[in-house]
Amino acid sequence: MIRFYNGLVLEPSGVTENEVWVDGSAISYVGPAREDMPLFDCIVNLRGDLLMPGFKNAHTHSGMTFLRSAADDLPLHQWLEKQVFPAEAKLTAESTAAFVKVAFLEYLTSGVTACFDMYYHTDEFARIARDWGFRAVLCGSFTAGNDWEEMYDYYQHYNHDFGPLVSAQLGFHAEYTTNREKLEYLSKVCHELKAPVWCHNAETASEVDGCIERHGVTPTKLFDSLGLYDYGGGGFHCIYMTDEDLDIFARRGLTAVLNACSNGKLASGFFRLKEAMEKGVRLAVGTDGPASNNALDMFREMYLINIMAKLREENAAAGDPALILNAAVSGGARAMGLDDCDAIAQGKQADMVRIDMHRPNMRPVNNVVKNLVYSGNPSNVRMTMVAGKVLYENGEFFVGEDPEDIYRAAEKYTREILG
């Protein structure tokens, strides 16, 4: 057992000074110090630092690290067609594994304890997550060119064959890379499995306009009419959502995953945060891939989501740091089907991050939540724990591999692909 004491704890009720005990992979106690102490294997004096739930990166493409700073400064569809798709055609399982490992290291240094990933060579991705002890949820990236009859096996495979830290949800890339016949088939699958469905949704104005030309309705209305949302799910980006689209999300209990840095860098637009909040739409936060961001930094995402809301509304009071922080930790967990990883509470999984409150950007401690959202950054992450196991602490990784070996392999494969 591990005992954390003498610090702050971000609980669902707010910031407390409680102790947190971890037994195996789960949190066994949260509360004040007690006289009837069990025998601990490890006692950690937090010395005023903060324990918080880990960030859940609710939309990313981990294997895209090879395109970091190599695929930049174009609008989305030109970026995909001219820079991304040609390079991705050269990926192998071995090269993708090297690039995924780089992303996982960055997640750990940024306090991310789980990611919702959509990419290629998924067996390699799942194997690395299992072997390292990192929590990961796969989301299918099916397009019109795939055999969608494999989707059922995909779902079963990743929900059963890689252990408790790896799972999967149904997903496809986007409306504009598939067709109605494929979506109707997916509807049958999701109803058979009673499973939620995810995809890129309303990321650009041209995407929505194209869907209306093809089907007479927005992507959200199309998916809803086909029954794809009957068991939940949601969309990534969700920028060009109409009022009716947001109403569908609110009524269906769907989650909009916000990706402010990617949307800003690609000049895609602003999420309608004010309207979504008013309608009660569920929110989560993701970085998108390292080719369009270029970082995998959830602190920066939270900051920019709030800043973009203020700019869009031309109102400094717009945005809500507490709501966005909750979206980045708990909202993402629930969206990804990780209900036992959404909070620091007894019985929940011990997916936690230690935040260094002795850094100058965290002082004075007028408001812990606003410090995290407006001034926090990965340098504040002292420890990242997944399922009770410390994977990163004080600059050192505990994943069974040498980071320098990972970097060398990633550089080698990057040169082979990009030249």
Image (cartoon, helix red, strand yellow):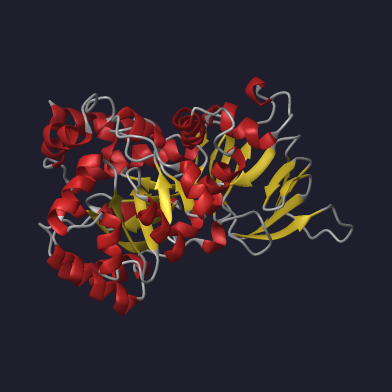
Residue at x-position 12% and y-position 25%: 419
| Image coordinates for residue 123, horizontal then vertical, percent | 26, 57
Kindly tell me whether residue 156 is visible in this rendering: yes
Residue at x-position 47% and y-position 49%: 276
Which image quarter holds the N terminus? bottom right
Residue located farthest toward the bottom when viewing the structure as drawn: 192
| Image coordinates for residue 54, horizontal then vertical, percent | 55, 46
Q: Which of 392 and 173 lies nearest the eye of the viewer?
A: 173
Q: Is residue 163 above or below residue 326?
A: below
Residue at x-position 36% and y-position 39%: 103
Residue located farthest toward the right when viewing the structure as drawn: 35
In the figure, is residue 51 to the left or right of 195?
A: right
Quadrant position of residue 104? top left
Q: Is residue 40 above or below residue 253?
A: above
Q: Which of 391 and 251 lies nearest the eye of the viewer?
A: 251
Quadrant position of residue 22? bottom right
| Image coordinates for residue 138, horizontal then vertical, percent | 33, 57
Kindly tell me whether residue 402 is visible in this rendering: no
Quadrant position of residue 90? top left
In the figure, is residue 400 to the left or right of 43?
A: left
| Image coordinates for residue 87, horizontal then vertical, percent | 14, 36
In the figure, is residue 6 to the left or right of 172?
A: right
Query: What is the number of callouts on the image?
Result: 0
